[in-house]
Image: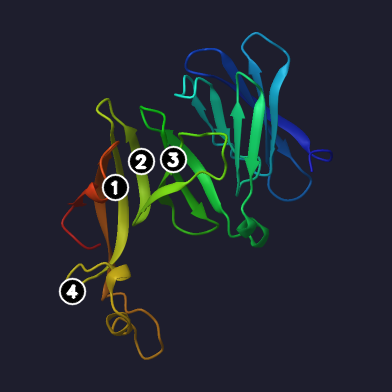
Amino acid sequence: MFESARRGGSEKHVSPIGCYELEIVTWEPPHGWAYSEGLVRRVGRHELIARILRNFDAFPFTWCEEHPTGHDYLIAGEDYQGQTIIELDTGARVDHLPDAAEQGFGFCWAGHLLSPRRDVLVVDGCYWAGPYELVAYDFSRPMHLPLTELHRWAGDLVSVDGFDSNDWLTWTFTRAVRVSDGKPYDDLTDDEEADLRDDDGRYRPELLGNQTYRARWRVGDPFEATQVELVGDGVA
């Protein structure tokens, strides 16, 4: 797909410790959306460690140096519905594309956050055209894909603040709720959900709204211990 594309701009990113460099190049085809190319090298070296030909213009990535395995990693995705992990110090590579991607139903990773201990990877992503979600994966064995999903937090993701120095992850999300009592839409019974619709089956906007929440979770705590508080005065 890159043969007929025109090379666009590029930008370089150096890993936090300064050992590796990722150059991201944009490619613009005659038709359709743009692609991107990731060129991974050691700083000051021309030889490639890896070349990632991504079928989308956005190129989310995360460096992971000094992992407990004793290796360094780059987290990315050659396919926008899949994952690519590069073991930077050895050049080893693994790719994963779920079967659901064939029908366009793969979970698209839009961004990643590593826990301070580097054993949990928190991903914000979505199913194509769907709301963004926040998902935690086991990152203790980076080269074993697919990563094991540990937890998927409820709600439509708005923003993620990241981890602080005390291992707390903080984010903001919204949930559809029943206006009368703030009960989450996902928790309604079939009869309660039906009461929100008019005679034509459409939702009555005065009965269904959204609430915004702030959430916090600390690495090592049970996911069920996630702290959630309401933001603002209530339903919008």
| Label pair 3/1, CB-CB below 8 angstroms | no
Q: Quadrant of residue 38?
A: top right
Query: Which numbered dot is residue 160?
Result: 2
Q: Which residue is mark 4?
A: 180
- Residue depicted at 35% across the width and 40% down the height: 160
Of the numbered discs 2 and 4, the one sitting upstream in the chain is 2
Instruction: Name the mark nearer the viewer: 2 or 4.
Output: 2
- Residue depicted at 25% across the width and 42% down the height: 216
- Residue depicted at 34% across the width and 83% down the height: 197
Please name the amino acid that badge 4 sits on.
Ser
Report whether 69 appears left or right of 4. left
Compute the Cα span from label 2 to label 4.
29 Å
Q: Which residue is mark 3?
A: 138
| Residue 179 screen position, x and y as percent | 22, 71
Of the numbered discs 4 and 1, the one sitting upstream in the chain is 4
Query: Which numbered dot is residue 223?
Result: 1
Compute the Cα span from label 2 to label 3.
19 Å
